[in-house]
Image (cartoon, helix red, strand yellow):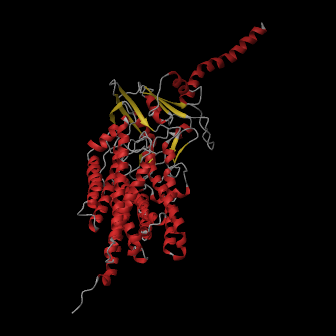
Amino acid sequence: MSDVNEDRRQFLTRGPALAAGIAIAPGMLLIDLAHGAEARPAGEPASSKVRWGMLIDTTKCESGCDDCVTACRKENDWPVPKSATDVQWIRKVELKQESTGRQVNLPMMCQHCESPPCVDVCPTAASFKRADGIVLVDKHRCIGCRYCMMACPYKARSFVHEPVIDHESEMPRGQGTVESCTFCVNRVDRGEQPACVEACAKEGHKALLFGDLNDPNSEIYQRIRSVTSVHLRADLGLNPGISFVGV
Amino acid sequence: MQQAKTFAQIESRYFYLLVMLGGLVALAGMSAAYYMDEHGHVVTGMNNQIVWGMPHVFAIFMIIAASGVLNVASIGSVFGKYVYKARGPLAGLLSIALLAGGLTVLMLDLGRPDRIIVAATHYNPTSVFAWNVLLYSGLFATVALYLWTMMEKRMNPWSKPAGLLVFVWRIVLTTGTGLIFAFLVARQAYASAVLPPMFIVLSFGWGLAVFLVVQSAMFSWNELELHPDIQKRLKNLLGTFIVAALYFVIAYHLTNLYFARETKFEHFILLDGGVYPWLFWVGYVLVGTALPMLLLYHPALGKGKSVLAASMLVIVGAFALLYVLIIGGQAFPLDIFPGYEVISSSFGDGQIGHYTPSLPEILLGSGGLGVAFLITTVGVRALNFLPHDDPKKVQHD
């Protein structure tokens, strides 16, 4: 009798914990997947074991929706573009396939190449690639020669043609230097998603998937292996970190 | 009654007038650079598609000509021709002046010219721009050394090896300038291995044209006549360079035309691209090539003033060709999405880029010419750069 009571007691104490575990675990897993990886501790350098990348599913990218662009602009505090001299870290592009007439929508930004021409040509090494594959501009070292803009095959970079006033963002910006998408490196280092990815998911489109291309457990790793995706201008052999579905 | 003064007596007044003129042009250029720095490049015609504009046309012309003008010196020192040997010092001075002018423009056009020192403290060995920083500084040093060996009697025996060093250095330098464009893999106008040799041959013609204009001005300043044999020889050299340059320009366009993926670009740049085909055919082919050839080789022409006019037209053609190559090359959109037509984009994807040269850019570019002019004017006054020709040696050369 006492044995049964013991079992019952154990069940009563451990059961709820197990049930709670079963209930919470998928949620935790989802959070983990959504975040891609854990936050990088301060002071620790970016790891070359990680390669941040993005899979853009153009079939889910809504025509006329530019939530990703707005989110990027708010996050990094760049103004609404009005002319050809204004910066654009990310833009929406509508395409029509010449042979079939099929229409495609996609967001266009820095492709974070494995062999970035912008990094090769920069005379002061202000353009650089982090160990985890994110291509950035050192805003304190850029002299504003714009050779990287000439070299980029994706027109991903912008030159700051005017003084930057009242800038409110973690991302430094300055007149006379070149800038482009940073994959929201500050957010990624905190274990968060880039602003564009978050905005697209919030709208329910989920056209953008961000994560570690080297981690077999990451959703992006698995998706890239299960769907047909392409790199833009793959003929150049730059191995961009961004792949597209439906192009 | 007061006697009319000869030119020799009032020459120094003219000298100061010229210095003031050059100084004013240079000052206007510096002011334009300051204005651009204060307000940002938004006050120029450049934008996020046409990222290099008029300052680069001026700067690249001066840098290419700075290398090519040394040809005159090389023919003298390296190949031992007397007529050219006498012209070596002037060629060296012009090279330094043009390079200084070109680099001034490039430097002041930077988004952050105040950070120019970073180019020396942080060096990226994979960047052809960074290689050029070394090549340009090296050219100043080697040409200065070369001038010393030519102008200091004790050093004369060293002028041949120094000339050889300069010869090799400038060929590498112009290759480097060509590579700035040839390395741009994704740009239809540029990714071509023919660009470096084309730049070298263009440099021969443009450098010689600048040399002939300056020499002509110096001879008339000193009330001297150029020996007809020298005139003929320099004229033929210029003619050869004009034809050789045309050959390379044709080869560049033909190779592009042959590749199906480049035909749209060639159509744009040679036929329906508005100002670009016009500048190519009228500016480069007609004014910069055909007319100079006519002026040089028409039986009734080919003398002093015709050669001077031909040289000036070659320079006009050079600006036209560089405008087409640099600005036209960027105006044509990148082919980011092969097989697709761009329906809409906020960033001008698939669209021809628009560019209107602005006054600050033109002033900055001209300011570089002003700097080169100042260095030349002061140089020829302070030191003996005037070519001295011994008629007997000219005939035996």
The answer to whether one can see residue B278 in this image is: yes
Q: Residue at (50%, 52%) from the top-left corner? A: A123
Q: Quadrant of the C terminus of chain B?
A: bottom left
Compared with B154, B172 (above or below) is above
Residue B396 at x, y percent in the picture: 41, 70
Q: Is residue B63 above or below residue B304?
A: above
> In the current view of this chain or complex, which residue is farthest to the top?
A1
Left or right, A20 with respect to B56, comes to right
Seen in the image, is B158 located left or right of residue B275? right
Rendered position, B396 above or below B365:
below
Q: Is residue A167 something one can see in this rendering? A: no
In x, y percent, where is residue A164?
Answer: 41, 51
Of residues A56 and B221, the one drawn nearer to the viewer in this rendering: B221
Give the residue drawn at x 30%, y 53%.
B284
From this viewpoint, which residue is outermost toward the right? A2
Across and down, in percent, residue B123 comes to 55, 53
